[in-house]
């Protein structure tokens, strides 16, 4: 059965092109289109309905120690009002999912997982956590919104004047809307210097969304669908489970995985620790037995379409393939400010042999074309509160 978020009617009434995604009916874009939505996020801001993400409440006296044995990052390093990125790995060090863990109160956590993996991870947690740790699936009770972009903080201040909002990355606070507690975290999936995710009960979600959408419209902030959400995360170089993260690939083949893996001494053992330790050693010493390939960022030297699955060659031999790719719109900047001029570039993430290095020229085979490209260290950089495309020298 396809599920509907509390905003389903709003999306349909306001031009949302609806598709089935991860078991939910969600907008891929609105009437303005993916390109306009992408550009609006980078220059002004964007509002997303991400209620398809899985949300699990985990609590009890031993919740922290139990989660410490189940997750790759260490929840005992958190405190109430903080959150961090983590992975859920198997014993071989392959990813079952990537996730965010929020500490709400002492002995109380909220784990957010990918929507497509919700049932799998729920079952895995039931098998992995001791019975005395309390678990509750809040996915269909607690909606989740995302507000990203340069004007996002200003919009929240308009909606909640005088409230203490999270100002540092990975901070979490609570405010109220129509008498209900709402959680606001300084997290997001677009790479923006400013961005927030909002957890609101289903009953209060439509009115809060309407307030955010109507107030934000005057600032240039627009509702954005799944299409631009994907191009935004790709432009920021962020991985997506099922593309960069794969169940049959070592977790640390994705560079961002290191943000969510804690191997410090004195921490109790956790699922996948030995395998991840070996992967980390190989990253440092250059060995390739357990980690022969790694995800890297690439840019085509001409704005031709490139897609995941396209083979990549370098120095006359095949060295891997694209995991994600697309033509991405961007603003031209003058100094640290965007102008009104736009352009397009073809960017991708690729799973490449570790012999491939930053700055190396590559050839991407897409359909019948051979597209010249280059491996880069990053696609974007922060400047003046904006996320700015890095230019090739």
Image (tube, rainbow, N blue to C red):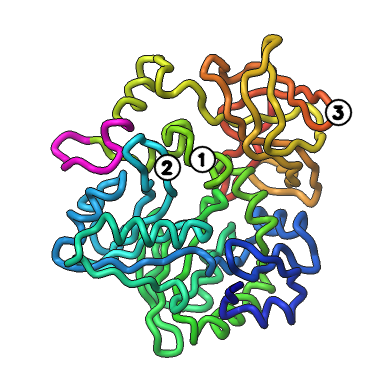
Q: Would you say residue 3 sits in the magenta stretch?
A: no
> Could you tell me which quadrant the N terminus lies in?
bottom right
In three-dimensional space, the C-alpha distance between marks 3 and 2, rounded to whole angstroms, equals 33 Å
Residues tagged 2 and 1 counted as in contact (Cβ below 8 A): yes
Q: Secondary structure at mark 1?
A: loop
| First along the sequence among labels 1 and 3 | 1
Direction from residue 276 to residue 351 in the image, left or right:
right
In the rendered image, residue 97, in percent from the top left (x then y), is placed at 44, 49
> In this picture, is 216 found above or below 73?
below
Q: Secondary structure at mark 2?
A: strand
Mark drawn on residue 368:
3
Mark drawn on residue 246:
1
Kindly identify the residue that appears in the image at 71 percent across and 10 percent down.
316
Q: Nearer the viewer, residue 174 or 233?
A: 233
Q: Nearer the viewer, residue 317 or 260?
A: 317
Kindly identify the residue that appears in the image at 64 percent across and 16 percent down.
360
Part of the protein shown in magenta: 264-276
> In this picture, is 208 found above or below 89?
below
Q: Which residue is mark 2?
A: 95
Circle 2 crowding by C-alpha within 10 Å: few under 14, some 14–19, many from 20: many
Kindly identify the residue that appears in the image at 73 percent across and 64 percent down.
29
> In this picture, is 344 found above or below 3?
above
Direction from residue 271 to residue 49 in the image, left or right:
right
């Amino acid at each position: 059965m396809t599920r509907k978020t509390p905003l389903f009617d709003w999306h349909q009434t306001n031009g949302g092109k609806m598709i089935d995604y991860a078991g939910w009916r969600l907008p891929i874009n609105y009437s303005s289109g993916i390109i306009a939505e992408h550009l609006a996020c980078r220059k002004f801001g964007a509002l997303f309905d991400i209620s398809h993400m899985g949300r699990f409440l985990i609590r009890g006296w031993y919740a922290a120690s139990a989660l410490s044995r189940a997750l790759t990052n260490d929840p005992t390093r958190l405190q109430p009002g903080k959150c961090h990125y983590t992975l859920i790995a198997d014993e071989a060090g392959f990813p079952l999912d990537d996730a965010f863990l929020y500490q709400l109160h002492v002995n109380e956590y909220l784990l957010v997982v990918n929507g497509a993996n919700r049932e799998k991870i729920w079952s895995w947690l039931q098998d992995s956590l001791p019975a005395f740790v309390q678990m509750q699936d809040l996915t269909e009770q607690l909606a989740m919104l995302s507000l990203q972009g340069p004007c996002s903080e200003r919009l929240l201040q308009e909606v909640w004047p005088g409230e203490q909002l999270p100002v540092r990355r990975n901070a979490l606070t609570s405010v109220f809307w129509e008498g209900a507690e709402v959680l606001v975290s300084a997290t997001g999936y677009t790479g923006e210097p400013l961005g927030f995710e909002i957890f609101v009960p289903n009953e209060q979600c439509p009115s809060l969304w309407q307030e955010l959408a109507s107030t934000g419209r005057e600032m240039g902030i627009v509702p954005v669908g799944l299409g631009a959400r994907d191009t935004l995360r790709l432009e920021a170089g962020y991985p997506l489970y099922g593309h960069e993260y794969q169940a049959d690939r070592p977790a640390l083949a994705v560079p961002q995985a290191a943000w969510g893996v804690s191997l410090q001494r004195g921490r109790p053992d956790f699922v996948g620790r030995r395998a991840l330790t070996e992967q980390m050693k190989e990253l440092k010493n250059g060995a390739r037995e357990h980690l022969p390939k790694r995800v890297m960022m690439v840019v085509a030297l001409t704005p031709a379409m490139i897609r995941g699955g396209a083979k990549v060659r370098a120095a006359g031999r095949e060295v891997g393939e694209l995991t994600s790719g697309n033509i991405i719109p961007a603003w031209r900047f003058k100094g640290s400010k965007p102008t009104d001029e736009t352009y397009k570039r073809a960017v991708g993430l690729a799973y490449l042999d570790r012999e491939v290095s930053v700055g190396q020229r590559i050839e991407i085979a897409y359909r019948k074309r051979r597209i010249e490209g280059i491996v880069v260290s990053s696609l974007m950089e922060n400047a003046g509160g904006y996320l700015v495309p890095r230019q090739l020298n």
